[in-house]
Image (cartoon, rainbow, N blue to C red):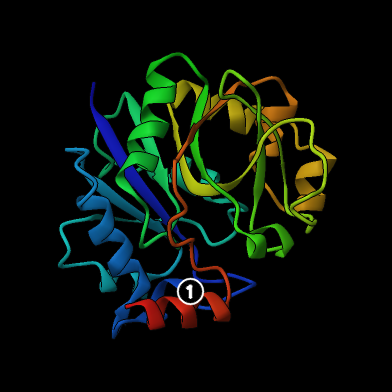
Amino acid sequence: MPLVCVIPARIGSTRLPGKPLRLLGGEPLIRRVVRRAFSLGLDAPVVVATDDPAVLAAVADTGAIGVLTAPDLRSGTERVAAAMAHPAFPPADLVLNLQGDEPFLPADAATGAVRRVRDGDDVGTAAQPLTPDGWRSPHRVKVEVDGRGHAERFFRTPMPPACAHRAPTFQHVGVYAYRPAALRRWLALPPVEAERVEALEQLRPLAHGMRIGVAVLDTAVPHGIDTEDDLRLAEAML
C-alpha cells in the first residue's frame, strides 16, 4: 500500500510568523521537519506543500518533493489536498500529514496514526501524556479518548489537571493519516462553529461522525513549535 508523507508549511503563521523559515539549531525549521520525516522508517516519499517559494528553496536539496500551493488555503488539510492534485504528487493509497512544526515527532506517533487507518478508522492521529504546563496552556491541544481509542473531543481551553473529564485526556500530537477518499469527504463537509471557536480543523470531521482513531504514546515527547517560547525551548534542548 503506497504511503506518502506530506508536510504542509504555511509561511503566514499567526502565532509564529515565518515559522517554516525560522532557524532552529542554525537551519530552517522546515528542513529539520523534512529530515525527521525521512527518519521515521515509513519508506515513503516526502512532499512539502507550501505557499512560499522561499520554503521550496529551503528544502530543494533535502530529497523532498516541493509543491507550491495557493496562499489563501485555510488549513493544513486543504494544503495537503491541493498538493495531491499537483502533477508531481506521487500516487498514494494512504497519506500521512505531518505538521510543519513537529521536528521531534516520534516514530510511534506516525506509525500509530497510520495503523489506526489501516485498522479501519477514517482518520488516524496520535497523543501523549499531558504535563501540568500542557494542561494550563491554550497552545496545547487536548484530546479526550474513549475506551476504544477514538477521539471524543479536541479543545485548547486551559484547565487544572485535577479537573474531572468524561474520558482520559491527552495532548494531541501534530500528525494525521487518512486515505484520499476520507480526505475528500473531510473537505466536503460544512464547517462547524466549534472548529472556528477553537481554531481546530479536526473538529469538523469529528462533528460529522467521522471516526478519528488516536494512537496514545506511553511517554511525553518534545511538543511542536507553535510560539516564540517553544522555539527558545527547542533551541535550548538542541
Residue 52 lies in quadrant: bottom left
Q: Please tell me which residue is depicted at 73% across the width and 63% down the height of the picture.
A: 136
Label 1 amino acid? Lys
Q: Is residue 98 left or right of residue 154?
A: left
Outermost residue on the front side: it is 162
Q: How many marks?
A: 1
Q: Relative to 75, is 99 on the left or the right?
A: left
Determine the image quadrant of residue 119.
top left
Q: Mark 1 sits on what residue?
A: 19
7 or 36: nearer the viewer: 36
Q: Is residue 49 left or right of residue 153?
A: left
Q: Residue at x 29, y 67 (%)?
A: 32
Residue 85 seen in this snapshot: no
Residue 72 x %, y %: 60, 59
- Looking at the image, residue 31 lies above or below residue 188: below
Where, quadrant-wise, is the C terminus in this rendering? Answer: bottom left
Q: Is residue 65 visible from the viewing direction of this image?
A: yes
Label 1 SS: helix
Q: Residue at x 65, y 65 (%)?
A: 133
Residue 100 percent coordinates (x, y): 43, 59
- Other residues around mark 1 within 10 Å, as few (<14) / some (14–19) / many (≥20): many
